Image (spheres, rainbow, N blue to C red):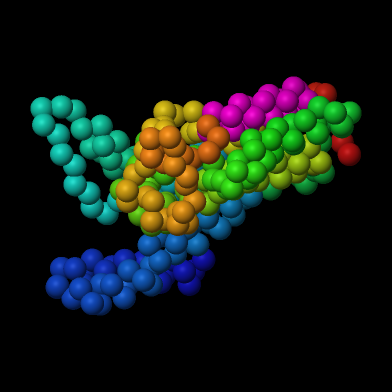
């Protein structure tokens, strides 16, 4: 964390100085050193994990750090937008992201303040698990995300949504390379049914934190996939990021992206509801393993 954080800070300062002095060749080298934000992730994420495991830091402080990291990855370094007598929703969204960047300062201040006032360490207790359930319903929760994935893979489509929709238009066209590659990875993982592995882990361990985190993750992915897409169209700047010849053509020559993302959303929400019904019980009813 110390090495990557120091390199990222020094490279960021040098990048700003290089642009000011017109040293574009040196600026390109420093941009490669920073890996377009990956170095920031490399040192911030372990710090957030350590803070979450340490009782000296409040949950609110950790969440402020998470929001700060996400907004820093989503906000581009520069952008151009046009609006002729209309509201530019792109500009509104980017302005909101810029306003949320204040959480970085709040996170740093709260982290330093809470570090000076250590809290007593709680007594260690074994993890509490929900009671096990009969396998038909847990197996159904695991299998649901695999059904639309199997249909898409049978037609040679490993991606969940593809280059269409408002999220893709922003992440693949405006945000940095790190955000774009992260979305491509998520698009591929959901497309091949990887959420089933997360559900399997929740079913096997059944701890309150893991079950709730899995339900929240499945719900957020389903909400993202339920946003309106533009079937038959694709963002030209996003297509080069996908494998050549992956998308077929429809009757009128439009691009075909495979199964509707709404089928994935229905499957993920169904799994989330099953986990909620099976394992999200009250703490008084939780059993120790």
Front position in the image: 119 or 156: 156
In this rendering, would 131 be left or right of 212?
right
- Magenta extent: 261-283
- x, y percentage for residue 275? 73, 29
- x, y percentage for residue 21? 14, 73
Image height check: is 257 above or below 113?
above
Image height check: is 180 above or below 214?
below
Residue 273 is inside the magenta segment = yes
Residue furthest left in the image: 85
For the C terminus, the quadrant is: top right
Image height check: is 80 above or below 22?
above
In this rendering, would 287 be left or right of 281?
right
Q: Is residue 27 visible?
A: yes
Residue 276 is inside the magenta segment = yes
Front position in the image: 184 or 114: 184
Residue at 20%, 73% in the rendered image: 24
Front position in the image: 255 or 86: 255
Q: Is residue 175 visible?
A: no
In this rendering, would 50 be left or right of 197?
left
Residue at 40%, 66% in the rendered image: 35
């Amino acid at each position: 964390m110390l090495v990557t954080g120091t390199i990222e800070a020094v490279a960021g300062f040098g990048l700003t100085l290089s642009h000011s002095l017109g040293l574009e060749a040196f600026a390109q080298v420093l941009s490669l050193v920073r890996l377009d934000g990956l170095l920031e992730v490399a040192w911030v994420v372990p710090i957030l994990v350590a803070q979450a495991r340490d009782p000296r830091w409040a949950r609110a402080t950790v969440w402020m750090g998470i929001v700060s990291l996400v907004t820093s990855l989503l906000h581009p370094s520069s952008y151009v937008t046009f609006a002729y007598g209309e509201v530019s929703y792109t500009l509104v969204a980017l302005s909101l992201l810029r306003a949320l960047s204040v959480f970085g300062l709040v996170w740093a201040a709260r982290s330093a303040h809470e570090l000076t006032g250590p809290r007593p360490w709680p007594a260690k207790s074994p993890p509490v698990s929900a009671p096990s359930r009969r396998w038909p319903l847990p197996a159904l929760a695991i299998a649901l995300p695999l059904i639309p994935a199997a249909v898409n893979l049978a037609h040679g489509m490993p991606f969940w949504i593809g280059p269409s929709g408002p999220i893709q238009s922003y992440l693949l066209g405006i945000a940095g390379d790190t955000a774009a590659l992260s979305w491509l990875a998520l698009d591929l993982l959901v497309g091949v049914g990887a959420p089933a592995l997360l559900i399997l882990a929740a079913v096997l361990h059944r701890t309150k934190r893991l079950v709730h985190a899995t339900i929240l993750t499945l719900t957020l992915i389903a909400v993202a996939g339920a946003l309106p897409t533009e079937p038959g169209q694709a963002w030209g700047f996003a297509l080069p990021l996908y494998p050549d010849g992956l998308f077929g053509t429809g009757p009128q020559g439009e691009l075909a992206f495979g199964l509707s993302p709404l089928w994935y959303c229905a499957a993920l929400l169904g799994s989330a509801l099953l986990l909620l019904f099976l394992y999200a019980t009250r703490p008084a009813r939780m059993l120790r393993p």
